[in-house]
Amino acid sequence: MKCPLCSINLQCSHIRTHKPKNARNGAQPNKGRCLNRNQIKQSYASATPPLPSILSHPMPSIPVIKGPDADAAYAAAQKVVETHQHLSKWIRPGMTLAQIDAEVARFLESINCRSCFYGYKVPKSPPFPSHACLSVNDCVVHGTAGYRREPLKQGDLLKVDIGVWHGRPNAWIGDAAWTYAIGEPTPAARRLMECGKESLARGVRELRPGNTYLAWARAVQNHVEKECGFFCVRGLGGHGIGRALHTPPYVANVVPTYNGEWPEASKACTPGTLIAVEPMIAVGTGDTYHNSLGRLDDWPVFTKDGSLSVHYEHDILITENGPRNLTEGLETIRDVIE
Ligand code: MF3
Ligand code: CO
């Protein structure tokens, strides 16, 4: 969904947090929404109280999932786990990303699924050209089958992100990422992987009624930055999921630093909300770069300093009793590929 005033895409995961063009420190007249010129004048003329909501466009509402829909979402999520399981045994050092992507396409077909990444469109980018996101070392997310020709070698960290459509006629989506070491990882790479898995586990525990999404981000960021000394990658985050790949809410991995940076931070974790949560962590910086010439291989996002990164993603249904991990099983797959 696009912001109609500034045309930034508001609800794509991994798509930057929406910093309104007219964001100002201190003043919060628009809660992260863009305003037209008259609205800006009005809002700053009276500073507080905030604008009535009819003047600014509301954030779209968060879908609620119940009963049999939860089973359908679970089935889709488990197809993703099955695919990871298969790949963890199938991938070998020396393989190329193109070979792995072709195997993802073949395997998904064999289990009655389709990639929901292939052909996915966001404004100003070409459709996503691969079946999986395959991202190596300093590539954090959105690696394509063609972005790197070099075969995988000992010491590489491969992030595999799989998204599927499953079930007819009303297909549901599952989306989960995991990081695999090619050969025995160095102690530093091992620490980074453990930090990623632990930050995901700690964050997930906070996704329960009575908490807001801020509790998730605080738990993840604390573990990564205070306890481990690594960096949460900025500007990318998780998302609602279900019948579409990206729905509200946006789920940042860091606590907001200016008013309006992350409007959903203060939203309650409500039973029935299904979200894909995905810490992205790097050794040396939280900053990223990517090419933006509109070419097919402009999708991959890299750490700005070239340092090593990891990515872990689960699909979590918030229930009365707390978080339910629909991608359960992913965390016990062997993550060293030999
Ligand atoms: N897990 C990623 C996400 O939620 C993968 C998206 S790849 C894309 O955004 F091509 F579909 F964008
Ligand atoms: Co995702």
Image (cartoon, helix red, strand yellow):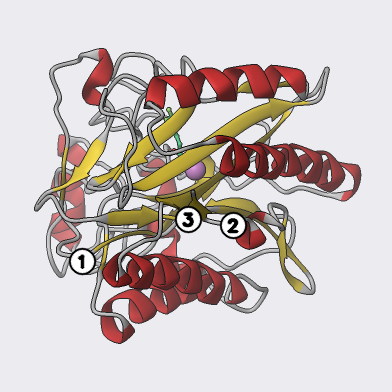
Residue drawn at 31 percent across, 72 percent down: 187
Residue drawn at 29 percent across, 53 percent down: 30
Numbered circle sitting on residue 83: none
Q: Amino acid at mark 3?
A: Tyr
Structural distance between the alpha carbons of marks 1 and 2: 40 Å
With respect to residue 225, does 72 lie above or below?
above
Structural distance between the alpha carbons of marks 3 and 1: 26 Å
Q: Which residue appears farthest toward the bottom when viewing the image?
A: 227
Closer to us: 309 or 298? 309
- Disc 2: CA contacts within 10 A as few (<14), some (14-19) or many (>=20): few
Quarter of the rendering containing residue 26 = bottom left
Residue 242 % position (x, y):
67, 38
Numbered circle sitting on residue 312: 3
Name the residue tied to disc 2.
Answer: 334
Residue 300 % position (x, y):
27, 32
* Left or right: 142 in relation to 298: right
Asked whether mark 1 lies closer than 8 Å to ligand 1, one says no
